[in-house]
Amino acid sequence: MTIRPYEKLVGEWPTRFHLRIDPDGGGLLLANAAEAAWLTPVGVRMAAGVLEGRSDQEIVEEITSAFRSAPEAQVHADLAQVHAMIADLAEPGDNYPVTNLGESFSIWERELGAPLRADVDQCDPERFRTIIRTLWDAGVPHVSIQADRAGDPERLPELVQAVEDIGMICGLRAAARWLSPQTIEACALSGLDHFDFVFVCDDPAEHDETCGVGDHEALVAVIEQCHGLELAPVAQWPLMDSNLADMEGMAEALQSLGVTNVVGFAIACTNDDAAADQAGALPARALPQVATTFFELAESTSARYLWAPPKRYDPGKSLRDQVLDGPRTSSDVSVRVRADGSVWPARGAQSAGNIFSSDWSAIWRHPVFKCYRERLAAPARCPECPDLPICQAECPQDPEGWSDDRKGGEVQ
């Protein structure tokens, strides 16, 4: 599998494309790591030709030579569709979090050959470079660095630069007050594409109770700085008992701040876990309604709201720490790579192996990914909430479909 990076000017703004070519000759075209389209082997060649700036006639001659049974008129018609698709994909602008699996991917006729994004923990630069090089070689075009609360923020621009040097899309996730304006600017100058911050509540006092004194003020400043630096600001919104009553107000606040990308993640517990419920986690039975409200807010604000896999409440940590840790991954097409090199799927309680001790092909063949793809291949609906798009990946009420990082067993 190979990835070819391209940049195409659309109006005044460049769109970054990544053309991923799978071993069967088909592929995936991503724009700003926000929108994606599957391509046949012929489509891959056409897309490459268009993005390389070759003339239509050159592309048509190549296709008719390689595929002699293809009528020239049909090739011209197919090429026109590829032009239209690329123009359409170029529209996302600063919508950097890649879409979740759902209607926008239509029918999954092909298996996902590799994750579309990896959320990678901050670690030593040399280890980090090994991790992202392995991911790039595997066909992963997008990395989001998960800042370590106890780590050195001054090393983050170096990590961003390492991602940029390869040609990958790069994000960074942290609570706003963890990073100085100077560090954020240095990351932007090093090639950062989006900055993800924790947004607990629009009330400064309540927000700061979780994220630390002054964090709400800092996140408002960070959002303004992102706009000035042409970074996409992304709000990570923990969904829990304490902020459900003000979901509409929080959505309006984000809209007023110009934040159009929001990742929601529920901190969930089983229906019979009274202690977790008392601590502020959401019982499984509440998740369908919470998700419904979440997506209704997206429609009312015309923003891009993504539902991350629910995070199972960990009794070994405070709710505050679980909020600050964030979701395991930002979406169902992402993986998490810990600082020790372990690779985790979006859901479940088992890692798939370690980048430093296993070949990537062995990691990707691990049952946790095989089962995950099989679930996606046949999305199920039920009478309880038949119109909820996230059910295509996993029923939100089923703990087996949550990320589970509780201590014990394989879970860290």
Image: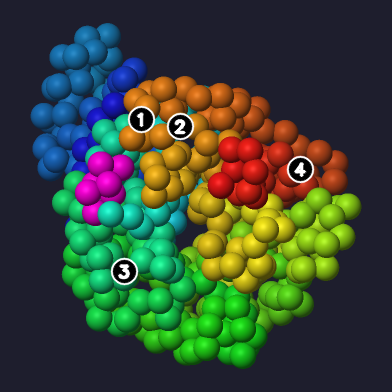
Give the residue number, with chain letter if any, for mark 3.
Answer: 152
Q: Is residue 87 visible?
A: no
Question: Between disc 4 and disc 3, whose residue precedes?
Answer: 3
Residue sitting at 13 percent across and 22 percent down?
Answer: 61
Whether the residues at callouts 4 and 3 have beta carbons within 8 Å, the answer is no
Residue sitting at 16 percent across and 29 percent down?
Answer: 59
Q: Which residues are magenta?
A: 125-131
Give the residue number, with chain letter if any, for mark 4.
Answer: 398
Question: Between disc 1 and disc 3, whose residue precedes?
Answer: 3
Q: Is residue 208 left or right of residue 356?
A: right
Which mark identifies residue 357?
1
Q: SS of the residue at dot 2?
A: strand
Q: CA distance from mark 1 to mark 4?
A: 32 Å
Residue type at mark 2?
Gly
Query: Residue 243's x, y, as percent?
Result: 71, 75
Is 128 contained in the magenta span?
yes
Which mark identifies residue 72?
none
Query: Residue 85's x, y, as percent?
Result: 35, 43
